[in-house]
Amino acid sequence: MSDSSLLRPYRHGALDLPNRIAMAPMTRGRADDATGVPNPRTADYYAQRAGAGLIVTEGIYTNILGKGGPGIPGLVDAAQIAGWRTVTDAVHAAGGRIFAQLWHVGRMTHPLILPGGATPLAPSAVRIAGSRIFTDQGMVDHVTPRAMTTAETDATVEDFATEARNAIAAGFDGVEIHGANGYLIQQFLAENTNLRTDRYGGSRGNRLRLAVDIATAVAAAVGAERVGLRVSPGNPENEIAEQDPQGTYRALLDAVDPLGLAYLHVIERGTYPALADLRPRWSSTLIANYNGAVPNSQAAGERALDSGLADVFSFGRHFIANPDLPARFATGAPISEYARELVYGGGAEGYSDYPALQGAS
């Protein structure tokens, strides 16, 4: 058996993890598209991966206007809460811990995805021009989003808090606020997507306001020890251009760290060395993830832990085809490749049918 630092237990605050391997959130697009209720296979999928120290679910929309594509689940009504309860029960029965990722995609959606052909909402009316978006009618051009009113932005804060309460009602151990990858919160943080002149735009402090208000409201709703925040400083995904990621994210941590959240989940991508810069400014658990800067691998995760850059390391795509990933790391077993064409949508194939190692626990 390996003595890898990834396999050592981790305890801090309310986090009590048997290993330091987190399953990163990954969109899989298998919920009922009409209802947003996770299908029965979702419980199998997550329970199979309960050997992770912590599971973070795919993004779950906080408001139907924040739904990012076909088959995206919600957590805003009784049926969705009941659907997720089957998932959390299955994960807990398998000995796992699971957080729900709270998600609003902002401009990263389309009228073909939203009810009644609604126009996507965003901080400002800035369209994504260099890529297309997947809908149930195939790939289409992005539309120009509608700038949210101040009242709609205020309401979004409460949407996150409400979904957090729903997540606890559904049996989740906690929630992760999705502030990364060019979705709504990062759209408010970035200068090129936030052209507002109200209290949510203009100065750096105003651009930080939505992220800080959401973190504060969610912590008040369910307890800070049950709340994580995911960020991707300097990440250009979805046409985000942050002029000064160091200044922005240092200021964000200065505002959020006093809340005493369970963890900060940092995706390092691009030229800004986010982990090295932000680690000394964060007093709680830090989960690291490399997305493009360094390939995610067992060795990369061990280096991040052993160097003190992180306390826990998250893996995404490795968990798709390797439901027993920690056991494979422990035994040196090969890591299986996933079928890229089966990642989004569909049924059990490429989702809950990947086998564990024979005899693996």
Image (cartoon, rainbow, N blue to C red):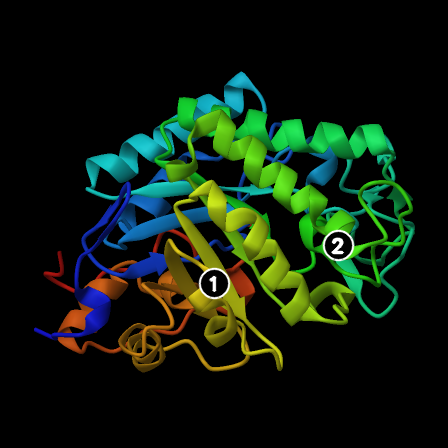
Residue occupying the point 49% across, 63% down: 266
Q: Residue furthest top?
A: 78
The Cα atoms of the two marked residues, 2 and 1, are separated by: 23 Å
Tags 2 and 1 touching, CB below 8 Å: no
- Local crowd size for mark 2, using a 10 Å CA cut-off: few (<14), some (14–19), many (≥20): many
Q: Is residue 166 above or below residue 26?
A: above
Residue occupying the point 25% across, 78% down: 334
Would you say residue 34 is visible in this rendering?
A: no
- Local crowd size for mark 1, using a 10 Å CA cut-off: few (<14), some (14–19), many (≥20): some
Residue 102 horizontal side relative to residue 186, left or right: left
Q: Is residue 254 above or below residue 291?
A: above
> Which secondary structure lies at badge 2?
helix
Q: Position of residue 152 (x, y in %)?
A: 80, 30
How many numbered circles are shown? 2
Quadrant of the image containing the N terminus: bottom left
Q: Position of residue 256 (x, y in %)?
A: 54, 48
Residue occupying the point 80% across, 63% down: 132
Give the label on residue 187, or none. Answer: 2
> Mark 2 or 1 closer to N-term?
2
Residue 87 horizontal side relative to residue 235, left or right: left
Would you say residue 276 is visible in this rendering?
A: yes
Q: Position of residue 21 (x, y in %)?
A: 29, 61
> Which tag is nearer the camera, tag 2 or tag 1?
1
Quadrant of the image containing the C terminus: bottom left
**Residue to which mark 1 is pinned:** 281
Residue occupying the point 63% across, 36% down: 33
> Which secondary structure lies at badge 1?
helix
Q: As shown in the figure, which amino acid type bears the numbered disc 2?
A: Gln
Q: As shown in the figure, which amino acid type bears the numbered disc 1?
A: Arg
Q: Nearer the viewer, residue 25 or 225?
A: 225
Q: Nearer the viewer, residue 6 or 286?
A: 286
